[in-house]
Image: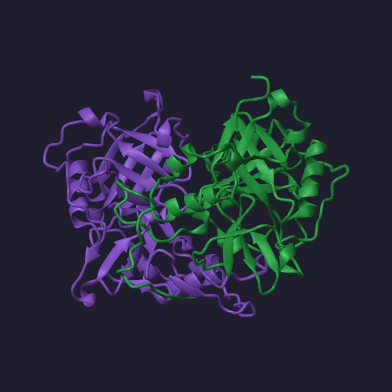
Chain colours: A green, B purple
Amino acid sequence: MLCVALPASAQQPAAKASSSELIAASKPSDWRAMDAENALYLDLPHGRVVIELAPAFAPKHVDNIKALVREKYFDGLFVIRSHDNYVAQWGDPDEKNSRAVKQAKTKLAPEFSVKFKDPKDMPPFARLPDADGYAPEVGHSNGFPSARDPKTGEAWLTHCYGMVGVGRGNEDDSGSGMSLYAVTGHAPRHLDRNITLVGRVVHGIQHLSALPRGSAALGFYDKPEQRVPIKSARIVADVPAADRTNIEIIRTDTPLFASLVESLRNRPGPWFKRPAGHIELCNVNIATRVAPAAGK
Amino acid sequence: MLCVALPASAQQPAAKASSSELIAASKPSDWRAMDAENALYLDLPHGRVVIELAPAFAPKHVDNIKALVREKYFDGLFVIRSHDNYVAQWGDPDEKNSRAVKQAKTKLAPEFSVKFKDPKDMPPFARLPDADGYAPEVGHSNGFPSARDPKTGEAWLTHCYGMVGVGRGNEDDSGSGMSLYAVTGHAPRHLDRNITLVGRVVHGIQHLSALPRGSAALGFYDKPEQRVPIKSARIVADVPAADRTNIEIIRTDTPLFASLVESLRNRPGPWFKRPAGHIELCNVNIATRVAPAAGK
C-alpha cells in the first residue's frame, strides 16, 4: 500500500458513546444466533470452547470438519500445542499413525480464498474505511473478519485473534481439518491466503489462550501428560437444547455496528486523551453474549 | 492515512532465507547485551520475567520505577489482573490503602511521547517502509517498537505484544509506575500516546501471558488466592552475576536486521505459498537469546 499521512492537526473528534454504552443500549435485532448446523463445541476438562464455522469461505473444509466431529474423530484426542503469541492446536499427537477416519476425507484442495466472477455473488461485507497493509479491502462478513480484492473477485478470512484454521504440511492440499488451530496472539496476518481458515472461537477462547506454553519447538507439548484431552467435539445441532451454550453475536451489518466501530476508532473520554483516528481490522471486537439455556 | 492499493499483480518475490536461517548465520556483533541499570527481573513463583526499560522514551517514569524496585515496593505484591487478549497487570491489589512509598513519587507528569526541536536529537530509528494506520512513521528504536511524527518532532513507543506500561486513572498524571502492565494480546495500538510505555518484556512473557484469566470486570482476579505473588523485583545491576539471566537481544540497527524484516515481510517457501508483501510493526519479532551465566 502507498500511504500519505494526514496532517498532524487532523486529530479526530471522539465518538459520543463508548462501545459498552452502545452495547447496553442495543436492541434484540442487533444480535443474531449462530446456525446450529455450522457451530461446534470443543469441550475441554476446564471448559467449553464455542466455534462458529464459516461455510461461505471454506465450504469443503467445513463439511469435512463436521464429518470428523460427527464420527467422533476428535473425542479423546488432545490439544497438542500452545505457542506463545501465536496459536493453540489440537488433533492427533501421533500424526504418522493417526486415528483412522471413517467417512471424512484426509486431504482436501486448499480454500485459501473464494473467488467470484460477479462481485454481487461475494459474501456480505461491511467494509472498514481504514487502511490495511495486507489487503486492498478489509471488513466483516457476518461477524468474521475478512478481506476482499475487488479486482480479482477474491474474498478471504483473515488471521485475527480467535480465528480457527486447518493445519497443513508443505503441500497445499495436505490439510483436512484433522488438525485445527486457533490464533491466540497478535494477528499473524502473513498466514492469510496461505492456509485455510474455517471459523472463529466466539466463546471460551481463554480455555485455549491461557494454556501453559509447550516447551518443544513451535510450542508443542513435549511430554504426553502436558497435553490437554478433548472430552468431546460436537456440532451444536446435535446437542440437546439443555446442554447448549446459547451464544448471541452482535450483527455486523447494522447501524449499531457502524457506531461500535467508530466508538473503537475514536474512543470517548474521560480516560482516552487522544482518539486514534483509525481502527485496525483485528482490533474490532465482535461482541457476544450468552442467553439463558432453553427451559432455564 | 490515505492509502492506495498496489496493483494485485504486484506480488512480491519471497526472501531468500528464513528468519531462523538468518539468525543461525548471525555474528556476535549482531547482538547486544542490555544495560543492567535499565533492566529488571520480575521473579514470580513459576519463573522469571525480564523487562528492558526505555529511558530514552520515558526518563522520569523509568527513574521512578527503578526507585520503587530499589525500595522493594513490589516484593510481596501481586499480579492482580489477567485480561484475555489484552494485558496482565501487577501492583498493590488495594490501591486505596496501598503500601507506603519511601523515596519514589506517587504521581508523575505523563510521558506519552517525547518531543524534540531538532530531529537529529530524536532516538535512533530503523524505519519500516511499510504503511501503518496509527502513525506517520513506525520502526524500531534500539529494539523497541516505536513511532515518529517528523512534523511535530514527537517519538513514542507503541503497544505491541510484550510492551510494558504504567497504569493510570482518568487524570493523565495519575500514574507513577506503582501499577504496571504488559500487553499479552493483539496490539492495542489505540492506547499509544494515551498512556506511558516504559519498556518491553524480553524474556519470560509466558509467565504473564499464560496466567489464568481473571473473572472480574477487566480481567481482575476477584479472589485474593487467585493473585500471583511477586517474589521480588530487582534491577539487574543489583543482582549478583551468578543469579542473572544473561539476555542478548538482536540489534535493530544492522544490515542483518533489515534482512530479518524482509524475511518476515516476504517469507520464503516451501511452506509459504504467497509472500505477504507487507510487515505490520507488531509482527516483527525481536529475537533474544540467553547466554550462559557468568562462571558457568
**Quick one: B244 or B5, which is closer to the camera?**
B5
Q: Image height check: is B281 above or below B51? A: below
Residue found at the far right of this picture: A103
**Quick one: B167 or B51, which is closer to the camera?**
B167
Tell me where residue B25 appears, x and y as whole percent.
Answer: 49, 70
Q: Is residue A222 visible?
A: no
Name the quadrant containing residue A69. Answer: top right
Tell me where residue B256 appears, x and y as whole percent.
Answer: 44, 73
Residue found at the far top of this picture: A296
Left or right: where B288 falls relative to A269: right
Q: Residue at x 52, y 53 (%)?
A: A258
Q: Image height check: is A75 above or below A264? A: above
Q: Residue at x 29, y 51 (%)?
A: B195
Q: Image height check: is A235 above or below B289? A: above
Q: Is residue A232 visible?
A: yes
Tell me where residue A175 appears, x and y as whole percent.
Answer: 75, 55
Left or right: where A203 falls relative to A39: left
Residue found at the far left of this picture: B103
**Quick one: A270 or B153, which is closer to the camera?**
A270
Question: Which corner quadrant holds the N terminus of chain B?
Answer: bottom left
Name the quadrant containing residue B6. Answer: bottom right
Q: How many marks?
A: 0
Left or right: where B265 falls relative to B94: right
Name the quadrant containing residue B276. Answer: bottom right
Tell me where residue A16 appears, x and y as whole percent.
Answer: 38, 49
